[in-house]
Image (cartoon, rainbow, N blue to C red):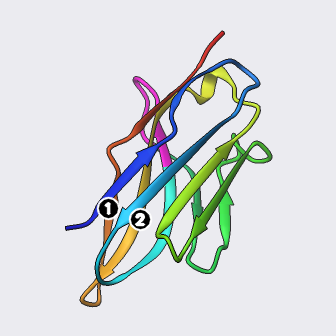
Amino acid sequence: QVQLVESGGGLVQPGGSLRLSCAASITTGSIGPMAWYRQAPGKQRELVAFITSGLTTNYADSVKGRFTISRDNAKNTVSLQMNNLKPEDTALYYCKAEIWLLGNPRDYWGQGTQVTVSS
């Protein structure tokens, strides 16, 4: 059974920083692209950043220059360093991973971790 477990959310003041982490527990297969999404109340889920297994990254325009996605392929983890946080970054953050089992890819999601930016 594949599980993605996120950690690191919380309450932070505007201008502050948080680091989110997500660990994928797999005993077989491989992991393709990993990503962070977020969903604010009343809004659609949106892509924040993704990273390929070759470490190519891409970011939403709203977070460029403030967020950094990274991954450790040996540990099956992906992280999101968030700096200069703004109130509009408040959302439930989810990690997603494309996991290949028996030659078939499938997307798996974490349970979400809340990030609240407020003074």
Q: Going 57% across and 69% down the picture, which residue do you hit?
A: 72
**Where does the image place residue 18, in percent across and percent down from the top left?**
64, 36
Q: Tag on residue 108? A: 1
* Disc 2 element: strand
**Where does the image place residue 109, in percent across and percent down from the top left?**
34, 55
Q: Residue furthest right?
A: 65
76 relative to 111, above or below:
below
**Where does the image place residue 19, in percent across and percent down from the top left?**
61, 42
Q: Which residues are magenta?
A: 37-45
| In the image, residue 41 lies in the stretch drawn in magenta | yes
Determine contact: label 2, label 1, CB under 8 Å: yes
Q: Quadrant of residue 62?
A: top right
Q: Which residue bears the numbered disc 2?
A: 97
Q: In the rendered view of the protein, which quadrant contains the N terminus?
A: bottom left
The one nearer the camera, 44 or 6, is 6
Q: Going 32% across and 84% down the picture, which residue do you hit?
A: 29
Q: Mark 2 or mark 1, which has the lower sequence index? A: 2
Q: Quadrant of residue 92?
A: top left
3 relative to 116, above or below:
below
Classified by dominant secondary structure, the portion drawn in magenta counts as: loop
Q: Going 46% across and 69% down the picture, which residue do you hit?
A: 76
The one nearer the camera, 89 or 74, is 74
